Amino acid sequence: PGEPSLAVLKGELQNAEEATKKAAAGSGAFLGLFARYSNSEGFGYIQCAEVQKQYNTAEASILKEQHAGLQVGDSVVFKVSLNQKGAPQAIFARRVGELTRQRQRILEVEVPLPAEGTAESPQEFMGFVSSFSVDP
């Protein structure tokens, strides 16, 4: 018939994430979200509930060289090692394209773009998203 409902899309994403988490855990990896990066620090950060449980911190850092090609909001499978400070640091990260596309589709339903030519307000602004955090 028509487009799937938001609830159906979220359910499909949750099922796909659970299956990916199980597969990742079998090889000692995690599933997370590339949440933000700092050019000045040379690090990116991956949010992950399992990292929170295991290391008591919501994010694992990742070196700039290792997050090349990742975009804020990408779902990633990653492995962790402790850095010199004892904090979790991703030593490997790979984008999970299908989960990233499913998240994007949900965002497009939740926050549709305005119709072309529509003025949302009398003023327009341009900027950059410097941090992204997903609701648990």
Image (cartoon, rainbow, N blue to C red):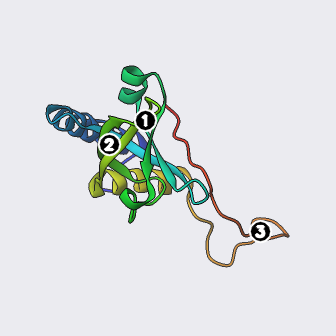
**Quarter occupied by the N terminus:** bottom left
Say which quarter of the image contains residue 10. Answer: top left
Q: Can residue 83 be seen by looking at this rendering?
A: yes
Of mark 3 and mark 1, the one earlier in the sequence is 1
For residue 122, above or below residue 60: below
The count of marks equals 3
Are the residues tagged 2 and 3 within 8 Å (C-beta)? no
Residue 59, position as x, y percentages in the image: 47, 36
Count neighbours of disc 1 (C-alpha within 10 A) and say few if under 14, some if 14 to 19, many if 20 or more.
Answer: few
SS at badge 2: helix
Count neighbours of disc 3 (C-alpha within 10 A) and say few if under 14, some if 14 to 19, many if 20 or more.
Answer: few
Tell me the CA gap for discs 2 and 1.
35 Å
Of mark 2 and mark 3, the one earlier in the sequence is 2
Kind of residue indicated by mark 2: Leu
Residue plotted at (65% across, 63% down) = 128
- Which labelled disc corresponds to residue 84? 1
Disc 2 target residue? 13
Of mark 2 and mark 1, the one earlier in the sequence is 2
Residue 101, position as x, y percentages in the image: 35, 57
Say which quarter of the image contains residue 22. Answer: top left
Q: Residue furthest right?
A: 122
SS at badge 3: loop
Kind of residue indicated by mark 3: Phe
Kind of residue indicated by mark 1: Gln
Residue plotted at (15% across, 36% down) = 27
Residue plotted at (70% across, 73% down) = 118
Residue 92, position as x, y percentages in the image: 29, 49
SS at badge 1: loop
- Which labelled disc corresponds to residue 125? 3
